Image (spheres, grey):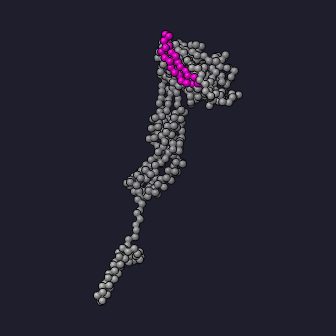
Amino acid sequence: MPNTIKNKIGFGAIIAVSLLAATLCGCSGTTPPTGAGNTSAAPTVAKAPTIAPGVTIDTVPVGGLTAATALQAVQTAATSAVANKIVIRFRDVNGNDSFHYSLSDFHGVFDYQTAIAQALNAPSNTAVPLPLHIDSGDVALHLSRVADVWRSPVLEPKVKFAGDSVESVASGRAGRDVNQAAALTEVLANLPSLAKPVIVDNIPFVVTKPEVSPSDVTGLSDTLVSYTTTFNPGNVTRTNNLMLAIHNINGTVVGPGEVFSYNDSVGPRTQQTGFQDAIIYVDNRMKKDVGGGICQGSSTLYNAVLLANMPIVERHAHSLPVHYVPAGRDATVAWGGDDFKFRNNTSKPIIVRAVATDGGTLTESLIGDRDAVPHPDAEVAIDVSPKRTYPDGFAVTSYRVVKENGVLIAREPLGISFYHNLIGGVPH
């Protein structure tokens, strides 16, 4: 019996000691009391890394800051700069004209995350850039619009007629076009920043010199082709516009291989340049607008060029049929839009001649050297298919038929011309 009791007490003592040891070493699920006797370590919270001293992101000091604090500082500075300073400016090479754009015009976005990541890994006193991403398509679009404004077409010598003879020849003038590919590259390589908020781009141009000298025109006297249409002189404003247009193209010289542009030759149709309101076609309707009627000049010339067997570079049909040429043989134009263009395929310059009479006839001719024509004996005719009618209008297909010594040498498709039904009436 005594041995039994002794063993039980010893076992209990062992259990008690074991429990105490477990409690002291933290093995128990019971939370130890706090105080000086607590030997367990307090949990530690990792500090956010900071940027090295002296580091800047596009002039914004961020040294010693955490990523979150640096991001806030840079965003604040950029927002202020975008609102008040940052401008992308296109300026011509002469510094005479400029166009200003904000970053929103190009969907400009600063790449904050890349800048912060670089700053965190940068050594002390490093200047980190703030990348800017813009839409190159938007830049190209605005550059094309600027190019249209700044474009100055080359002017070949201009002929002044005295009756049917050349009275004098004025010298030409060099033209210029924006080099849009080079300009786009320049803009994308020199984007604004917080340190340099205004970018001035001296937009590069391509200069084109006249190909024809006045002496090259002397002696040109062969009428290669002529075509005549009629108009109503009683329609005063329309006649005024037509007369202005043919005055501007009359005597225009087109060098060998050069492309003639009706829009470039006539110039802007504005009240300041003398044009008045007359009927034009827009969206299958008739309305009055500045310059109405000048399409008779382009359509008459189109027919002359067709018969001269010269290549057509650009031609557009009206949306409604016209009265002065057959369907399929008209050529509509619009300033800044549709144009009529052809190429001089002779080996010498040609002169565009346009003459209108008080009786209402317009004759347009091409004057040149018949010996310079590729096929001087060719017979040219225009073949137009019968009308194909549709619920909203009709269409015709045109061909240029060329024969030499009675043998067909070419049947050139000129395209399909679709004419709509008139919507609304004729404005008064």
Looking at the image, which residue is at 49% across and 14% down?
408
Q: Is residue 412 a member of the stretch shown in magenta?
A: yes
Residue 78 seen in this snapshot: yes
Which of these two is toward me, 29 or 203? 29
Specify whether 30 is left or right of 235: left
On the image, the x and y values in percent for residue 282 come to 62, 30
Name the residue: 39% across, 57% down.
52
The spot of residue 295 in percent (x, y) is 60, 24
Asked if residue 133 is positioned above or below residue 1 in the image, the reply reads above
Residue 120: quarter of image: bottom left
Do we see residue 341 in this rendering?
Answer: no
**Rendered view: 268 above or below 194:** above
Q: What residue span does the magenta drawing correspond to?
A: 394-417
Q: Quadrant of the N terminus?
A: bottom left
Indicate whether residue 344 is drawn in magenta. Answer: no
Q: Residue furthest top?
A: 405
